[in-house]
Image (tube, rainbow, N blue to C red):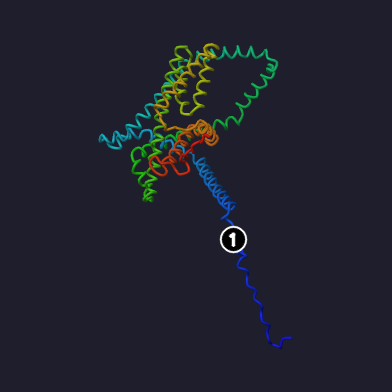
């Protein structure tokens, strides 16, 4: 028995050096394994999606400012070569800007007057033919077993009449007047922003690039130059292609003596700025007008003319005028059109493809002139060994 106050010696057992001791893991080390890295990437993706959603929300809330701003940037990019040419010839920036704006307004005014003139001169003829065609179609449709009875038609007409005379339709008309006022305000803002972009665009871009230095400055410069060149090439190339399409279809419609040939050609020119879908819509409208006015055979010929012009444009003219500017897969274009239409309607469909082309162009020059970002570079294909 040990004596009072005396401690017994403590036996210390040495650890076997061959046995590994697993130390306690620090809390942050849980993010270092595969699942942790996946969680980090997921959080980063959520943040990126949240920021993108916030930007889209702000853009949709301030369409009166953002839409004129984007359109002014696109128009300024399209007119950039003309402005550079006039500046190189010693023309003052203010005078060159005024000349460009006046030419643009004159072209838009001429297109509008052309549409009004053609519709005014041929509207009575088209209305009579449309009424006759509708009567023939209605007579044929009455023979179908599922066609509504005259009593049902009278009931529907009465409902439409009640709606047109109701307060709800009046509030809709007031909203339409407000939309016209908003359009005028946006147009004035568009012209004002375009004036300053054309006049002081290079100086404004240099001001934006002041915070960047070194490689970041060079990358920002490349991104800006690529954006301007892509937007400008897209607008000029699409306008040239649309002009050729509209002239070709106009010649076909005039030969076939289809009413409203000039307005339909102008509509073809406008819809050509919506890739893939625009040409289809223009062809359908032209065929419908030919069907109502000239009959089924004439409408089929119009469809053939539209298909022929579109094939010539897509296979020969567009690659020459636009080159690799719009080198996007058809699947990417369709997805961009769908997203743009869902977010911004018709205007979103028009702007979706050039914005997508700009994004891809920026990726192509991210690491240097003609050097895409690392993740977007083509991987070498290993040779296939034949045994």
Q: Name the residue under label 1.
A: 27
Q: Residue furthest right?
A: 1
The answer to which of 146 and 361 lies nearer the viewer is 361
Give coordinates of residue 319: x percent, y percent: 42, 27
The answer to which of 68 and 233 lies nearer the viewer is 233
Give coordinates of residue 77: x percent, y percent: 38, 35
**Would you place residue 2 above or below residue 223 in this image?**
below
> In the figure, is residue 176 to the left or right of 102?
right
Label 1: state its secondary structure.
helix
Give coordinates of residue 266: x percent, y percent: 44, 22
**Would you place residue 360 above or below residue 5 in this image?**
above
Image point 61% across, 13% down: which residue? Answer: 137
| Residue 65 visible in rendering | no
Q: Which residue lies furthest to the bottom in this view?
A: 4
Q: How crowded is mark 1: few (under 14 residues within 10 Å), some or many (20 or more)?
A: few
Image point 34% across, 41% down: which residue? Answer: 200
Could you say which quadrant of the image residue 143 lies in?
top right
Q: Residue furthest left?
A: 90
> In the figure, is residue 91 to the left or right of 250?
left
Give coordinates of residue 281: x percent, y percent: 52, 24
Q: How many labels does the image show?
A: 1
**Would you place residue 20 above or below residue 271 in this image?**
below
| Residue 237 visible in rendering | yes
Could you say which quadrant of the image residue 297 lies in?
top right
**Which quadrant, please, contains the N terminus?**
bottom right
**Would you place residue 12 above or below residue 358 in this image?**
below
């Amino acid at each position: 028995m040990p004596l009072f106050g005396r401690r017994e010696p403590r036996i210390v057992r040495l650890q076997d050096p061959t046995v590994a001791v697993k130390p306690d893991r620090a809390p942050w080390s849980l993010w270092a394994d595969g699942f942790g890295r996946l969680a980090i990437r997921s959080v980063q993706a959520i943040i990126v999606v949240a920021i993108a959603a916030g930007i889209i929300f702000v853009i949709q809330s301030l369409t009166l400012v953002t839409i004129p701003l984007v359109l002014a940037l696109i128009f300024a990019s399209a007119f950039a070569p003309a402005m550079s040419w006039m500046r190189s010839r010693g023309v003052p920036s203010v005078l060159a800007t005024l000349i460009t704006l006046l030419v643009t307004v004159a072209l838009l005014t001429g297109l509008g007057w052309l549409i009004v003139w053609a519709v005014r001169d041929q509207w009575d003829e088209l209305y009579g033919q449309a009424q006759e065609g509708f009567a023939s179609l209605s007579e044929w449709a009455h023979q179908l077993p599922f066609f509504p009875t005259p009593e049902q038609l009278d009931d529907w007409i009465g409902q439409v009449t009640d709606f047109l005379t109701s307060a709800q339709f009046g509030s809709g008309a007031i909203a339409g007047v407000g939309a016209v006022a908003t359009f005028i305000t946006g147009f004035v803002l568009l012209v004002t922003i375009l004036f300053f972009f054309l006049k002081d665009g290079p100086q404004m871009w240099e001001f934006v690039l002041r915070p960047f230095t070194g490689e970041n400055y060079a990358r920002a410069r490349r991104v800006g130059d690529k954006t301007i060149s892509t937007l400008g090439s897209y607008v000029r190339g699409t306008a040239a292609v649309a002009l050729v399409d509209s002239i070709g279809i106009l010649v076909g419609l005039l030969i076939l003596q289809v009413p409203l040939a000039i307005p339909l050609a102008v509509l073809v020119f406008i819809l050509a700025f919506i890739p893939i879908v625009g040409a289809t819509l223009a062809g359908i409208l032209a065929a419908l007008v030919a069907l109502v006015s000239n009959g089924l055979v004439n409408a089929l010929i119009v469809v053939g003319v539209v298909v022929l012009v579109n094939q010539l444009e897509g296979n020969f003219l567009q690659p020459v005028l636009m080159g690799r500017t719009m080198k996007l897969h058809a699947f990417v274009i369709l997805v961009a059109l769908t997203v743009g239409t869902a977010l911004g309607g018709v205007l979103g469909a028009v702007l979706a493809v050039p914005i997508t082309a700009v994004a891809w162009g920026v990726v192509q020059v991210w690491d240097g002139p003609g050097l895409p970002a690392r993740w977007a570079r083509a991987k070498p294909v290993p040779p296939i060994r034949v045994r």
